Amino acid sequence: MLETTVMNPLLMEAVQRLGLTNRQSEIVMLLSKGGDIDALARELSISRATIQTHLARIYTRLKIRGRAELMSIILSDVLTHSPRQHVGTLESQAPVAALAF
């Protein structure tokens, strides 16, 4: 089962900056943790088709074509907004490790 209670704060902030709805943000967070469409549907108690609709709207809103581009945008944002004092430490690698492709 996907972990929805413990999320990386930098990852959460990056997703918030995308300007998505709360549900879309929730879906992006779960995707970034490695969930597939079926796992997300089970976790959120909604249909697979609803997840696909949300993803299509996310991709359209962000003018991207898919999950890889979405994760790239989030990773870039996390790295851009990471505190400088952690650069080069294991802590700085945590946001990267949190994104599952």
Image (cartoon, grey):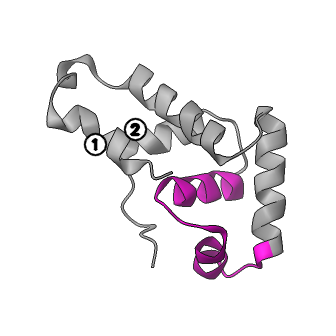
- Determine crowd level at label 1: few under 14, some 14-19, many 20+ residues with C-alpha closer than 10 A: few
- Determine crowd level at label 2: few under 14, some 14-19, many 20+ residues with C-alpha closer than 10 A: some
Residue 92 x, y percent position in the rendering: 25, 32
Residue at image mark 2: 10
Q: Are marks 2 and 1 in contact (CB under 8 Å)?
A: yes
- State which region is magenta: 22-48
Nearest the viewer among 17 and 101 is 101
User: Helix, strand or loop at disc 1?
Assistant: helix
User: Helix, strand or loop at disc 2?
Assistant: helix
Residue 95 x, y percent position in the rendering: 35, 40
**Picture residue at 41% right of the left edge, 69% below the top:** 3
Labelled disc at residue 94: 1
Nearest the viewer among 69 and 43 is 69
Q: Quadrant of the N terminus?
A: bottom left
Name the image quarter holding residue 26: bottom right
From this view, report whether residue 39 is shown above or below residue 51: below
Residue 47 x, y percent position in the rendering: 77, 79
Q: Is residue 13 left or right of residue 96?
A: right
- The CA distance from mark 2 to mark 1 is 9 Å
Residue 31 x, y percent position in the rendering: 56, 57
Under mark 1, the amino acid is: Ala
**Picture residue at 16% right of the left edge, 37% below the top:** 90
Under mark 2, the amino acid is: Leu
Nearest the viewer among 5 and 87 is 87
